[in-house]
Amino acid sequence: MKSLKDSELIRMMTFDKYLNRISGISSGGNQLRVSVKKSFQSASFSLFWRNWNPLFGYYLSLNINRPIKKISNSTISSFVTFLFSGFVLHDVWIMPLFYMIFHKVVWFPVTLIFLCYCFLIVFERFVNIRRRISGKGAQVIINTLYIIGGSIAGGLISALLLLKQMNEGPSQDC
């Protein structure tokens, strides 16, 4: 019997089967608690994101990451997936909200944070830093530090772009 690749299995699965596969339970009740716990205890930052939001993870994996990985490599598919998620799933509604607050365009605040997260994933794959780290407590600490560090880095980049825009004042091109 021919064995199916992981991507072929996911394409054939319903969302509920996918959810059961990654978390061990079907949708409902304890899913949020299980997803958060499993994410923070993950042995890599890539696995953290796979477990973090199973609904978006399923659709992003099925429709963005895996099709791009077929024509490219995992690094490029990860960047495209994170950029898509940051912009389409977050910044499309956050940027107008920030515009109402600051009366300036805040360019891609979540996308910049997600870009930093993706750099951490690629760095972690390249360095293979976690291969000797065991223990769920250590994994929780590392994943928490990655979330905090990536958020701070992306937030600082976004804030610097906003400050630059605010300091430039109105355009003189009349």
Image (cartoon, rainbow, N blue to C red):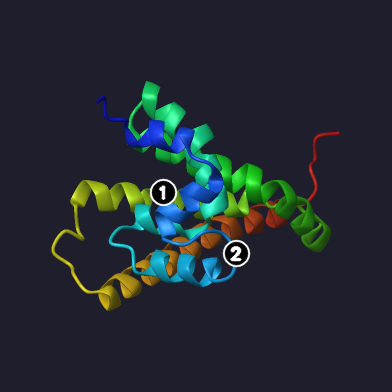
Q: Position of residue 81 (x, y in %)?
A: 49, 40
- Residue type (three-letter) at the residue carrying disc 1: Cys
N-terminal-most mark, 1 or 2 = 2
- Please report contact status of discs 1 and 2: CB closer than 8 Å, yes or no: no
Give how far apart the Cα atoms at labels 1 and 2 are. Answer: 29 Å
The residue under label 2 is: 28
Q: Is residue 5 visible?
A: yes
Q: Look at 37% across and 49% down and name the residue there.
A: 119
Q: Position of residue 72 (x, y in %)?
A: 36, 25
The residue under label 1 is: 118
Q: Comparing marks 1 and 2, which lies closer to the viewer?
A: 2
- Residue type (three-letter) at the residue carrying disc 2: Gly
Residue located farthest toward the bottom when viewing the structure as drawn = 137
Label 2 packing within 10 angstroms: few (<14), some (14-19), many (20+)? few
Q: Position of residue 58 (x, y in %)?
A: 51, 45
Q: Is residue 122 above or below residue 27?
A: above
Q: Is residue 130 above or below residue 74?
A: below
Position of the C terminus, as image quadrant, is: top right
Residue sitting nearer the eye, 168 or 117: 117
Marker disc for residue 44: none
Residue located farthest toward the front when viewing the structure as drawn = 1
Q: Position of residue 35 (x, y in %)?
A: 47, 65
Residue sitting nearer the eye, 38 or 120: 38
Secondary structure beneath dot 1 equals helix
Q: Is residue 107 visible?
A: no
User: Is 39 on the left or on the right of 165, as rendered?
Assistant: left
User: Is 11 on the left or on the right of 96, as rendered?
Assistant: left
Position of the N terminus, as image quadrant, is: top left
User: Is 139 on the left or on the right of 9, as rendered?
Assistant: left
User: Is 157 on the left or on the right of 103, as rendered?
Assistant: left
